[in-house]
Image (cartoon, grey):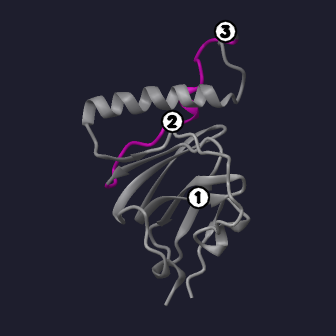
Amino acid sequence: MNKLNQVKPMSNLIKKGTIYVGSMIGYYKIEAFKIEHFFTAYAQYSNAVCVVFLPPYETKRRYILKGYNPKFVILDGWGHPDTPGESSYRIENDSKFETRRILLDSEFADEVFESFFSDYVNAKNPRILADYRSFVPSADRDYRIKPRYKEFEGSEHGTLNEE
């Protein structure tokens, strides 16, 4: 029996979905199968957000675990647009411009994604399964609580070893 079947997920299994993941320099899109999202103990957080998924054409499930400032949006199905790329950060035919954000400021990436995502939701009305952008995990972990999977003990990203 593999490790993933030993623990019941807190959320329903999403057969096919799109995950938008926020990082310090922007958001990126992952289309995947068998998506689970739940809370688990990680570092000082008792309820860090974890997303486990199976990328297409791969056999091992991957996970992304974020304690501080988790920025996940999970949509039903595939075919959703890519996040704004570098072209949306450029200003053509100008060598100087003013902004209230410094280079690589995560708040700028959040504003760009928020604008893109709200326009997309208003135009196409996709089914949003989970949105953790405004979730703030509590940093009051009781260290007697064990993580859901042993693989979560040391890293934020990785694969699950299913034996």
Mark whose residue sits in front, 3 or 2: 2
> The residue under label 2 is which amino acid type?
Ser
**Helix, strand, or loop for circle 3?**
loop
- Give the residue number, with chain letter if any, for mark 3: 98
Check disc 3: other Cα within 10 Å, few if <14, some if 14-19, many if 20+.
few
Task: Say the numbered circle drawn on residue 134.
Answer: 2
The x and y percentages for residue 64 are 58, 58
Q: CA distance from mark 1 to mark 3?
A: 35 Å
Name the residue tied to disc 1: 64
Q: CA distance from mark 1 to mark 2?
A: 17 Å
The residue lying at 65 percent from left, 12 percent from top is: 99
Q: Earlier in the sequence, mark 1 or mark 3?
A: 1
Q: At 48% from the left edge and 43% from the top edge, which residue is drawn? A: 132
Which residue corresponds to the image point at 70% horizontal and 30% vertical from the top-left?
A: 104
Q: Is residue 157 left or right of residue 162?
A: right
Dot 2: few (<14), some (14–19), or many (≥20) neighbours within 10 Å?
A: few
